[in-house]
Amino acid sequence: LAKTTQPISMDSYEGQEVNITCSHNNIATNDYITWYQQFPSQGPRFIIQGYKTKVTNEVASLFIPADRKSSTLSLPRVSLSDTAVYYCLVGDGGSQGNLIFGKGTKLSVKP
Amino acid sequence: SAVISQKPSRDICQRGTSLTIQCQVDSQVTMMFWYRQQPGQSLTLIATANQGSEATYESGFVIDKFPISRPNLTFSTLTVSNMSPEDSSIYLCSVDTGQGNTFGSGTRLTVV
């Protein structure tokens, strides 16, 4: 499974757009990019998954450049409740769930 | 997506004892996964539990310390055996929904 590198922490203010970038230089052809969100005292929650270009859902957007060596999770207009740790994972979309987590990015949203 | 019920939610245990954590899923799943999250750290996969066969353990985890049962397609248990303070962690079960994993709320274990 490809290793990922993310910033350890980020600060933002309510109403701002937050972009968290993840590097995965040795991503394999069949690897997907998946992001999870974890609040304190809870298990991680799936946010979004993509393979290339752009994916958008009701929570976030995921931007993946053509070389797929990085990806950016975009959270529009964050609120205090978006304060959490965000994990970027790269692996075979059909790996059936044995996920390998990196250190994640701790996002702090301030009023 | 699947709903996972995990219990106990927390426990404080004496060293040398064992604790069994239960994970119930509201739908049938082929594989269930057990993770450990040590204080302030990321998640580490302990093992993958298949129904009808022995669990597959990741490097650094052994069956004698973390025996797993998987009696049917909706249920699994993880036992933390002969506990020491180093086993104090959050233990989570997880299933693959086909669109990412769903996690239980975790069991916060403190060993004293």
Image: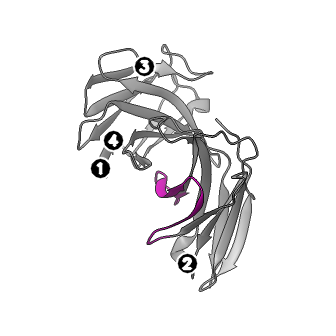
Whether pointer 2 and pointer 3 mark residues with C-beta atoms closer than 8 Å, the reply is no
Q: Are marks 2 and 3 on the same chain?
A: no
- Looking at numbered disc 1 in the image, what kind of residue is underneath it? Val
Label for residue B7?
Answer: 4
Image quarter hosting the C terminus of chain B: top right
The mark lying in front, picked from 4 and 1, is 1
Check the residue under mark 1 and report the chain it is in.
Answer: B
- Looking at numbered disc 4 in the image, what kind of residue is underneath it? Lys
Check the residue under mark 3 and report the chain it is in.
Answer: B
Where are the magenta residues, as a range? Answer: A37-59
What SS does tag 2 mark?
Answer: helix
The spot of residue A81 in percent (x, y) is 51, 74
| N-terminal label among 4 and 3 | 4
The mark lying in front, picked from 2 and 3, is 3
Which residue is found at the position 23% from the left and 41% from the top?
A: B27
| Marks 2/3: CA–CA distance | 40 Å
The spot of residue B36 in percent (x, y) is 53, 37
Whether pointer 4 and pointer 1 mark residues with C-beta atoms closer than 8 Å, the reply is no
- How packed is label 1: few (under 14 Cα within 10 Å), some, or many (20 or more)? some
| Marks 3/1: CA–CA distance | 22 Å
